[in-house]
């Protein structure tokens, strides 16, 4: 359904825009129909940037985004609006996603004005009610209320209902549950997983590995704007090959076993590493086989086994 | 060192009345113990942490005693608490790393802080450098501005700063929440090392992330809606919790190895009560799957097994 | 657009002393402006009384050295000042909104260009420009003066509005509005501006006060309107005709006090309103 083809995003930073910040470098992956793909990365990995590029909130520096066969990277105007009928997003902070001075369901009436201007009021009411019920909300409890009167979980569900109103095919979920309480997180997560049965594809952006495992068939591990490892979720988690993925798996706090006593890795450099053109993980890589070719050439993404790709030339 | 808290209650003053953020907290902390204080937002854990060190308006001290090493802590009196702060009790507040003054070099900020406590920066410098090495920060950090450091580095810096005078009690409020997975592990392990090297005697680690507590805490205390729900050793809480809230909370946490398709986890329906006018009796009863008539009466926080405290009628023998 | 917070705002508004004092003083002058002309029988420019007479029961503020009724001049001058404040301040705010919203919302090159424009206008010596304009315009009215003030005072408003817009722009609801297919203009006016209403009010109050002050200054040095009386013009005349030396204090004290009081009251109102709208500034 959605294919990212060699996407890059370069920011000009520094005085007079002299230096370049490569937020995303040559990323390619695709999301099939009714598939949930987890985009996993820490801060600085570029995962939110990719989400925003897919949603066309940020322009793309190079590459193409192909949605159902159509290149949407440069759409504008009414064509862009058509794109939004099919692709929507839900963001991390539920309270920032609503204009605090208006009621929460204004977000629905905006959609009505923009996309459904011809629809009759009773039809619209039915549509709204069925969307709300599909996300597990009681219309009487959430309509006509201000955002500060509702909880984070309710607001996130409202935002998902908003996407359902448009009957989207693709949803970008950017850290949608990280700001929710532990007891409501799993409910919203289950909701997203349920929506798969409606044929919805989801790009689930997160830094939390256990969430990725719970909900997705496919996972993409990002590091500093490049794909480190990608493929079927079980393969990535149970048989991690890239040194970065292995480090992540070892660092996740689990409830069934304690951290191994391996040496704790700490980054000594101040933030902001230079773009060298070689492997982005070179500085932290613990592989004994690493050499100058790693620092010089960007390793390509190779299929090591079926549906398991790794970007490391030393494997 | 030991910490004894008895019946501590702290409210928040607002226009609409008093928000009963913390009520009747009673527990003890032993020497060298790392206790995790877990709960969701609004349960009172940050209020609790702050009240032990800086109780200022809009917080209001209502009742209770705090004994640190047998000596009463005058937490209601900010003036008299001054000699204790930083030296006996120290805190790493939430968002500490964004609270570093961006216009001061780190070294200058530290020297100003120490001088304000009546401690000479010169004499403390060698120890400061040793500790920086311990957390793997180079000495150059003292000459840098906060903006030049990454999140993990700032957090480690704040950790060193808060423990510089070897306080007996350290309160760490959500210090790993804003960090990446790899840095979280480093910071959490560093906390344990501080305790092992006796830089601090005991630690109260406030967080909502139970899995980090499983990794480093000796015991866990779970709070709900301003009251203590359960307190026990880490193994007991994670593997054999007794309070219905704890049970539901643990079972709602996704784990690596659990897939939606295979085993769908469930959350806790409803939301925590507002503490402006909290419900009478057990505050969890509206969401509790095993609530019964006795729950209209507030359950006491009792020891049902060796070092295992619960506030739930169902867990007391007469009602099981 | 009203939410439950309205009651909270009213509550704090009624208790804020600065707001009450500021508004009271302003109200006093407004009443004087409306009612004043009815209380005096003499038009401001006519020679109706004895020369340089001190305040008396007939001429409440005395007369000028030409025998004009100072009270009458005063209330007409007040009207002129308020007019300049509204038109000049209003124009300044509008232009500031135009530039500020565009720069804050679009960012990037547009922002850079508008910033440069703002800085240039800020740096232009308005006095010099005004002198040149004066040389070409025979007759100047209050309206022209207000337009001029508005066109040179907007940079301050633009900067403030740009900063606020920047911070609101980064909130997710703006992104969601874009995802809903709204165009930029609609987003600015339906999502961003309503969130800034209190801020825009404060900006307008400051522009109002600034405009009154600038007008008084211009009038005082003789660059003001030629066909109407204003407070600054009164002071100009007073100094020109030696009121300071001759001790005709009733000629320049009322307009001076009035300008100080009005502008001061506006600024105090501003501070008070800021406290009312911003919970963090309130003392609990």
Image (tube, coloured by chain):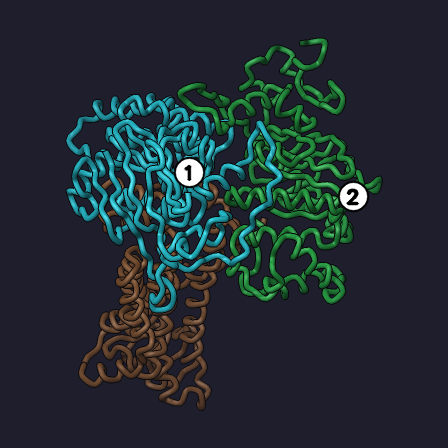
Chain colours: A cyan, B green, C brown
Residue drawn where x is 46% and y is 36% of the image: A208
Report the residue that reaches farthest toward the front. A289
Residue A158 visible somewhere in the drawing: no
Residue C211 left/right relative to B311: left
The N terminus of chain A lies in which quarter of the figure?
top left
Q: What's the residue at 68%, 55% (across, down)?
A: B131
Measured as percent of width and height from the top left, residue B243 is found at 63, 20
Of C255 and A6, nearer the camera is A6
Q: Compared to B48, does A75 lie above or below?
A: below
Look at the image and tell me whether residue B99 can be seen: yes
Callout 2 secondary element: loop
Q: Chain of mark 2?
A: B
Q: Quadrant of residue B298?
A: top right
User: Residue C217: which quarter of the image?
Assistant: bottom left
Check disc 1 and report the residue beneath it: A206
Please, what secondary structure does the residue beneath circle 1 have?
A: strand
- Residue A181, percent across and down? 50, 32
Residues at marks 2 and 1, CA–CA distance in whole angstroms: 43 Å
* Eye-nearest disc, 2 or 1: 1
* Residue at 59% in and 13% down: B291
Q: Residues within 10 Å of mark 2 (few under 14, many from 20)?
A: many
> In this figure, which residue is indicated by the disc labeled 2?
B73
Q: Nearer the viewer, residue B212 or B303?
A: B212
């Amino acid at each position: 359904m959605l294919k990212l083809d060699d996407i890059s995003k370069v920011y000009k930073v520094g005085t007079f825009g002299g230096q370049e910040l490569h937020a995303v470098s040559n990323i390619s992956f695709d999301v099939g129909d009714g598939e949930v793909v987890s985009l996993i990365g820490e801060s600085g990995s570029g995962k939110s940037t990719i989400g925003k590029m897919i949603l066309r909130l940020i322009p793309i520096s190079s590459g193409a985004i192909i949605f159902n066969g159509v290149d949407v990277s440069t759409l504008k105007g009414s064509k862009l609006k058509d794109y939004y009928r099919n692709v929507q997003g839900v963001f991390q902070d539920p309270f920032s996603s609503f204009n605090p001075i208006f009621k929460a369901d204004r977000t629905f009436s905006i959609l009505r004005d923009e996309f459904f201007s011809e629809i009759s009021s009773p039809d619209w009411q039915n549509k709204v009610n069925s969307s709300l019920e599909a996300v597990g909300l009681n219309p009487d409890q959430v309509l006509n209320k201000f955002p500060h009167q509702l909880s984070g979980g309710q607001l996130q569900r409202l935002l998902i209902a908003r996407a359902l109103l448009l009957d989207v095919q693709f949803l970008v979920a950017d850290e949608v549950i990280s700001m929710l309480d532990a007891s409501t997180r799993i409910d919203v997560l289950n909701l997203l997983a349920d929506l798969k049965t409606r044929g919805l594809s989801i790009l689930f952006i997160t830094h939390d590995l256990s969430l990725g495992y719970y909900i997705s068939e496919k996972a993409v591990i990002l590091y500093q704007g490049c794909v480190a490892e990608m493929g079927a979720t079980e393969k990535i988690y149970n048989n991690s090959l890239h040194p970065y993925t292995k480090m992540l798996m070892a660092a996740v706090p689990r409830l069934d076993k304690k951290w191994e006593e391996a040496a704790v890795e700490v980054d000594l450099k101040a933030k902001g590493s230079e773009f060298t053109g070689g492997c982005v993980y070179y500085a932290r890589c613990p592989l004994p086989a690493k050499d100058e070719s790693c620092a010089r050439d960007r390793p390509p993404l190779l299929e090591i086994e079926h549906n398991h790709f790794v970007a490391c030339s030393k494997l | 060192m030991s910490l004894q808290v008895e019946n501590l209650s702290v409210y928040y003053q607002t226009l609409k009345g008093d928000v009963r953020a913390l009520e009747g907290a009673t527990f003890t902390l032993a020497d060298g113990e790392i206790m995790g204080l877990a709960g969701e937002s609004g349960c009172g854990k940050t209020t609790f942490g702050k009240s032990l060190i800086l109780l200022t308006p809009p917080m209001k001290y209502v009742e209770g005693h705090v004994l640190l090493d047998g000596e009463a802590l005058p937490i209601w009196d900010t003036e008299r608490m001054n000699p204790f702060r930083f030296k006996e009790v120290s805190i790493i507040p939430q968002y500490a790393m964004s609270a570093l003054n961006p216009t001061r070099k780190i070294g200058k900020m530290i020297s100003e802080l120490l001088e304000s406590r009546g401690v000479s920066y010169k004499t403390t410098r060698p120890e400061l450098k040793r500790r920086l090495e311990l957390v793997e920060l180079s000495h150059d950090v003292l000459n840098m501005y906060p903006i030049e450091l990454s999140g993990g580095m700032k957090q480690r810096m704040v950790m060193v700063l808060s423990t510089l005078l070897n306080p007996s009690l350290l309160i760490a409020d959500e210090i790993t929440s804003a960090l990446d997975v790899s840095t979280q592990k480093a910071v959490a392990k560093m906390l344990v090392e501080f305790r092992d090297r006796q830089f601090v005697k005991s630690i109260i680690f406030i967080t909502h992330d139970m899995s980090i507590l499983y990794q480093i805490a000796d015991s866990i205390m779970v709070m709900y809606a301003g009251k203590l729900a359960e307190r026990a050793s880490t193994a007991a809480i994670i593997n054999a919790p007794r309070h219905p809230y704890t049970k539901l909370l643990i079972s709602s946490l996704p784990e690596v190895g659990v897939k939606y398709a295979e085993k769908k986890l469930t959350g806790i329906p409803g939301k925590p009560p507002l503490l402006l006018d909290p419900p009478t009796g057990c505050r969890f009863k509206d969401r509790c799957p095993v609530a019964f008539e006795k729950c209209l009466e507030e359950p006491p926080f009792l020891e049902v097994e060796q070092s295992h405290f619960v506030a739930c009628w169902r867990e007391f023998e007469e009602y099981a | 657009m009203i939410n439950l917070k309205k009651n909270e705002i009213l509550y704090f508004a009624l208790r804020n002393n600065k707001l009450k004092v500021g508004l009271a003083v302003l109200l006093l002058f407004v009443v004087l402006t409306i009612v004043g002309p009815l209380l005096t029988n003499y038009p401001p420019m006519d020679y109706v009384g004895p020369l340089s007479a001190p305040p008396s029961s007939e001429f409440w503020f005395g007369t000028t050295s030409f025998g004009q009724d100072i009270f009458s001049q005063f209330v007409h001058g007040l009207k002129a000042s308020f007019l300049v404040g509204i038109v000049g301040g209003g124009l300044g705010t509008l232009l500031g909104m135009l530039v500020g919203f565009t720069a804050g919302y679009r960012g990037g090159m547009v922002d850079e260009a508008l910033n440069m424009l703002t800085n240039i206008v800020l740096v232009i010596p308005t006095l010099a420009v005004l002198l040149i304009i004066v040389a070409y315009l025979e007759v100047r009215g209050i309206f022209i003066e207000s337009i001029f003030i508005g066109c040179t005072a907007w940079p301050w408003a633009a900067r403030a509005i740009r900063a606020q817009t920047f911070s609101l722009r980064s909130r997710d609801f703006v992104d969601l509005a874009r995802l809903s297919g709204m165009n930029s203009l609609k987003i600015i006016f339906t999502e961003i501006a309503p969130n800034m209403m209190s801020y825009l009010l404060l900006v307008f109050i400051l522009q109002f006060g600034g405009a009154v002050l600038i007008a008084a200054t211009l009038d005082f040095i003789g660059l003001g309107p030629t066909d109407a009386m204003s407070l600054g013009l009164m002071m100009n005349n007073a100094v020109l005709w030696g009121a300071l030396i001759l001790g005709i204090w009733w000629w320049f004290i009322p307009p001076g006090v009035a300008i100080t009081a009005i502008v001061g009251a506006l600024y105090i109102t501003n501070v008070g309103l800021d406290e009312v709208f911003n919970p963090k500034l309130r003392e609990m």
